[in-house]
Image: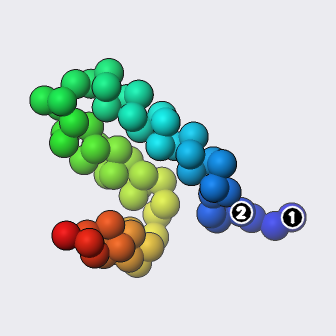
Amino acid sequence: MTVKNTLEFVELEQVYDLLAQAIDKVGKDNEALFLGKLCITLAHRVGELDSVKDSIRIAAKQF
C-alpha cells in the first residue's frame, strides 16, 4: 500500500475554500489567532520538525 503525502490540486482548492470559510466564521479580529492554532495543530499532526521548518521557510519566502 502506497502512502500519499501530498494533496492533489483539486484537494488544495478544497483546503483554500475551507480556510476562507473558517476565517470568515472566526472574524477578522481572530484571523491571526486561528491561523496560528491551525499551524500548530497541523505541525503536531505532521510530526516531523524538518518538514514543519521547511514549510515555514516556504510560506515566509515571499515576505
Q: Report x, y in % for residue 25.
A: 32, 21
Residue at disc 2, secondary structure = loop
Q: Residue at x 28, y 44 (%)?
A: 35
Q: Nearer the viewer, residue 55 or 12?
A: 12
Amino acid carrying mark 1 in the image: Met
- Residue corresponding to mark 2: 4
Residue found at the very far left of the displayed protein = 29
The circle on residue 44 is: none
In terms of depth relative to the viewer, which is nearer, 44 or 52? 52
Could you classify mark 2 by the number of other residues whose Cα lies within 10 Å: few (under 14), some (14-19), or many (20 or more)? few
Helix, strand or loop at label 1? It is loop
Asked if residue 63 lies left or right of residue 23, the reply is left
Left or right: residue 3 compared with residue 40: right
Question: Would you identify the image quadrant in which residue 22 lies?
Answer: top left
Residue 54 in view here: yes
- Which residue is painted at 22% across and 36% down in the image? 31
Q: Residue at x 42, y 52 (%)?
A: 42
Residue located beneath label 1 in the image: 1
Q: Quadrant of the C terminus?
A: bottom left
Q: Residue furthest top?
A: 25
Residue at 26% across, 37% down: 34
Does residue 42 appear left or right of residue 13 in this picture?
left
Residue 58 found in image quarter? bottom left
What distance separates the C-alpha of mark 1 from that of mark 2?
10 Å
Badge 1, how many Cα within 10 Å: few under 14, some, many 20+?
few
In the figure, is residue 8 to the left or right of 52?
Answer: right
Mark 1 vs mark 2, foreground winner is 2
Q: Is residue 57 above or below residue 12?
A: below
